[in-house]
Amino acid sequence: MDIDSTQLSAILSRLQFAFTVSFHIIFPSITIGLATLIALWEGLWLKTRNPVYLQLAKFWIKPFAITFGMGVVSGIVLSYEFGTNFSKFSELTGAVLGPLMAYEVLTAFFLEAGFLGVMLFGWQRVSERMHFFASCTVAVGTWISAFWIIAANSWMQTPAGHKIVNGRFEVESWFEVIFNPSMPYRLSHMLLATLLTATFLVMATSAWYLLKQQHQAFARKALSLTLWLALLLTPLQILIGDFHGLNVKEHQPVKLAAMEGIWPAREANVPMLLFAIPDPANEKNLFEVKVPGLASLILTHQWHGELQGLKSVPKADRPNVPLVFFSFRIMVGIGLLMMFIAAAGLWLRLRGTLYQSRWFLRLCSLMAPSGVIAVLAGWYVVEVGRQPWLVQGLVRTMDVVSPLPAERVALSLSLFVLTYSLLFGVYLYFLGKLIKKGPPALADLQQLKVGVKASGYAVAFTKNLADETQHQGAN
Amino acid sequence: MDISLFYFLLLGFAILMYVLLDGFDLGIGILYPWFNSDAEHDHLMRSVSHVWDGNETWLVFGGVILFGAFPSAYALLLSSLYLPIMLMLIGLIFRGVAFEYRFKSHSSKMWWSRAFAIGSTLAAFCQGLMLGVVVQGVPSDAVQGSSLQLLTPFSLLTALSVVAGYALLGCAYLVMKSRGAIQHKAAQRGRLLLWLVMIAMALVSLYTVLADPLIWQRWFGGWHTLLLLPLPLLALAAARLLYRDLGRVRKSHHLAEQVVVKHEDRPFWLAVSLFVLAFVGLLVSLFPYLLPRQLSYQQAVAPDHSLWFMLPGVLIFVPLILAYTLWGYRIFAGKVEDFEEGY
C-alpha cells in the first residue's frame, strides 16, 4: 500500500469515528438528564400524590425510551470501533482503558438494561415503590456510565498514573488514572450539561403546548419547574465551565490557545475575541471583534496576565484552529442564551405574566435542540482541540490507526452515513409524533395492579375487566 | 488458578451468555418470515421487547473483557474481521431500533418488521461467519488483504449453523412463552431446525477434528477420550429429548380435546444445554488459543496490574448482574399476552 492510500484510510477511519461518536452522544446527553427528571417526577408523585407529576413521568418516559434505544444501538458500535479502526491504539492503551470500560459495563450498562425493562414495561407488574426504585436505578446507572467513560476520556486528555513498558501503557496507580487532573471538571461539566439538555428540551415542549393552548396544567407545571432548574443550573454550569477552562490552560495550553485564537507564543493583556476568523496559514486572525484584556482577566485573573499561544509549538502540533475556535463560541453562546432565558423567566414570573408572554414562550420553544448543540460543540472543542494527539503529548492519532484498505473503511463509513441519516430522520419524526400526541389524560392514569407474582394472564384479565367497566361506565 | 486463565474462562462465559440470551431474541427475528399476520409479529416482538437490551449488553461485556484483559487479541481480531463486524453492527442497529419504532408506526409497520427480520438474520449470519473464520484460523493478511477470503465453505457452514441454531432457540422460547397457533408452529419448525442444527454441528465437529492433527490428538489421542465422550453423547440425548418434547407440543394441537402439555419450559432448557455442550466442545478444541495457531491467551494477556484491578469488579458485579437479570425475567414470567402493556 502506498503512503497516500494509508493516509486516506486513516483519515476515513477518523471521520468514521467522529461521525459515529457524534451521532451517539446526542442520545445519552438527552437520556442522562431525562432519566433524572423522570425519577424526580415519579418521586414527587409518590410524595405529593399530585397526578400531574405522574402525567409528566408517564409522558416523558416515551421520548426517553426511543432516545435510550438509539443510544444503545449507536453505543455498541463504539465499543467495537476502537479495535476495528484503531487497532494499534487498542493494543497500546488496552491495559489502561479496557478495565475502565469493563467497569462501565459491569456497574452501569447491565444495571440500566436490567431495570429499564421494569421501568418501561413493569407498571402493572410491580408496586409503585418498586417502579420508582427501577426508575432511580436507571438514572443512577446513566450517571455511573458517564463517570467511567469520562474517566477514560479525561485520561486521554491529561494522562496520569501510568508508565510505558516496551512501548505499551501500564498502570502504576489506578486512582491517578481515574481521577486524573481534568476528570473532576469534565465530569461535572458534562453531567450538568446533560441535565440542562433535558431541562431545555422539556421546557421547549411545555412552552410549545402553552403557545398552542394545549395541556395547560401539565405544561405550566413543567415550564415552571424547568425554569427554576435552569435558574439553578446555568450559573453553576458557567462557573464550572470557567474552572474547566483554567484546567485546560494548565494542562493543554495549545487547546486553550485554539479556543481563544491566540497566535503569539506568549502574549500579555490578551483580548477576548467576540468574533474572528482564524487564518492558520498566516498564523493570525481576520475580522477581530474584541474586548481588550478580558481573556487575560478571566484566565489569569489579572488584566496583564500572560497566556501561551499557538506559535509556541510547531505547526504539526496544532489542532484545527477554526473548528475549535467556532465550536467554543457556539457552546458559550448557547450557555449565555440559556442564562438569559432563566433570568427572563424569573422576571416574568415575578411580574406574573410567565404563561402569557408569547415572545418568551416562542423563544423557549426554539431552545429544544440547544442543549444537544452545545454538548456537540463542547465535545468538538475537547476532541479536536487535543489533536494531533490521541493521548495528549504521548500518542499521535495518525500513528495508531488500523492499516485497513481505504475502500473498506469508505464502505463502512458510507453504510453508517446512510443508516444514521435515515434513523435520525425517523427518530425526529417519532419524537415529534409523541410530542404532538401529548400527555396521557389524567383519567387514563388509573392503574389496576395485580402485584408482582401475578402471571401475564392475570394481568390481562384485570386489564380487560377495567376496560369493560369503563365501557359500561360510558354507556 | 492462574489469573490469565480466569479471564480466558470469563471471556468464554461472557460469549456463552451472549449466545444463549441474544441467541433466542435474534432467533425470534430470524423466525419472523415464518409468521404472517401483524398480530403474530406483535406477539413475537412483545415476547422479547423487555429483555433484548440486557441480552445485547453481554456482547459489549465480551468486547470490553477482550479489550481489557487481552488487548492485542482485541486489536488483531477486530481489525481482521472488519467487514463482518461492521455488517453485524448495522444489523444490530436496525433490529434494535425496530423494537422502539414498530409498535409506534402504522403505515411503515411492514418496514420495521423487515428491518427486525433482516437485521437479526444478518447479525446472526455475521457472528457465525466470524466463528468459522476464527476456528479455521484468521488469514495473516486479513487486515490488508481482500475481505472475500473470509468467505470459505466452512465459514459459510458455520454462519448458516448459527442462524439455524438461534432460530431453534427462538422456537423453544416461543413454545415456553406462547399458546395456540404460534406455539404449534414454533414446535413444528423447531423440529425441522433441530435436524439442521444437528447435521451442521456434526459437520463442523468433523471438520474441526480432521483439519488439525493437534485437535484430533486432543479428542482421540489417549485415555481422555473417555472424559470427553460424554459431550457428544449428552448432546445427542438432549437433541433426542428436545425432538420428542417438541413433537408432543405439536401433537397436542392436533387433538380435539385440550391436552395439557407438561414441560412447556423444557424444550428451551434442552436447546440451551445443546448450545452449552457445543460451546464446551469448541473450547476443548481451541484451548489455549484466542486466535487458533496464532495467539494464545497467555501471549495476549494484559499486565497483572490491570487484571487484578478488574477482579473485584467481576467477582462482585457478575453475580449481582445475574441476580437482577433473573429477577427481571421472573417479573415477566409466564405466557406473553396480547395487549398493550407498558410505557
Image (tube, helix red, strand yellow):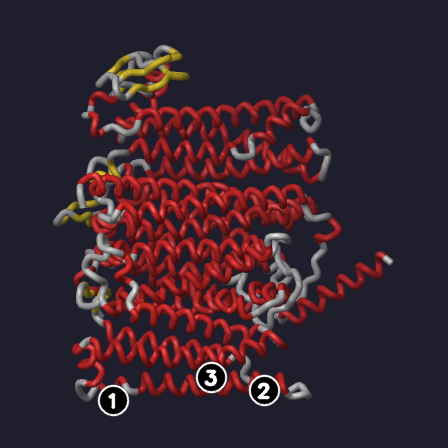
Is A252 above or below relative to B138? above
Task: Determine which residue is flagged by label 1.
Answer: B226
Q: Amino acid at mark 3?
A: Leu
In the rendered image, residue A54, in percent from the top left (x then y), is placed at 66, 48
Q: Amino acid at mark 2?
A: Lys
Q: Are marks 1 and 2 on the same chain?
A: yes
Is A135 above or below relative to A19? below
Tell me the quarter of the picture where residue B80 sits: bottom left
Task: Determine which residue is flagged by label 2.
Answer: B251
Q: Is residue B30 left or right of residue A186?
A: right
Q: Earlier in the sequence, mark 3 or mark 1?
A: 1
Q: Earlier in the sequence, mark 1 or mark 2?
A: 1
Q: Amino acid at mark 1?
A: Leu
Q: Is residue B147 left or right of residue A137?
A: left
Which element type, helix, strand or loop, lies under badge 2? helix
For label 1, the crowd category at 10 Å Cα-Cα, with few meaning under 14, some 14 to 19 and many 20 or more, is few
Is B2 above or below relative to A189? below
For label 2, the crowd category at 10 Å Cα-Cα, with few meaning under 14, some 14 to 19 and many 20 or more, is some
Task: Determine which residue is flagged by label 3.
Answer: B242
- How many numbered marks, from 0 up? 3
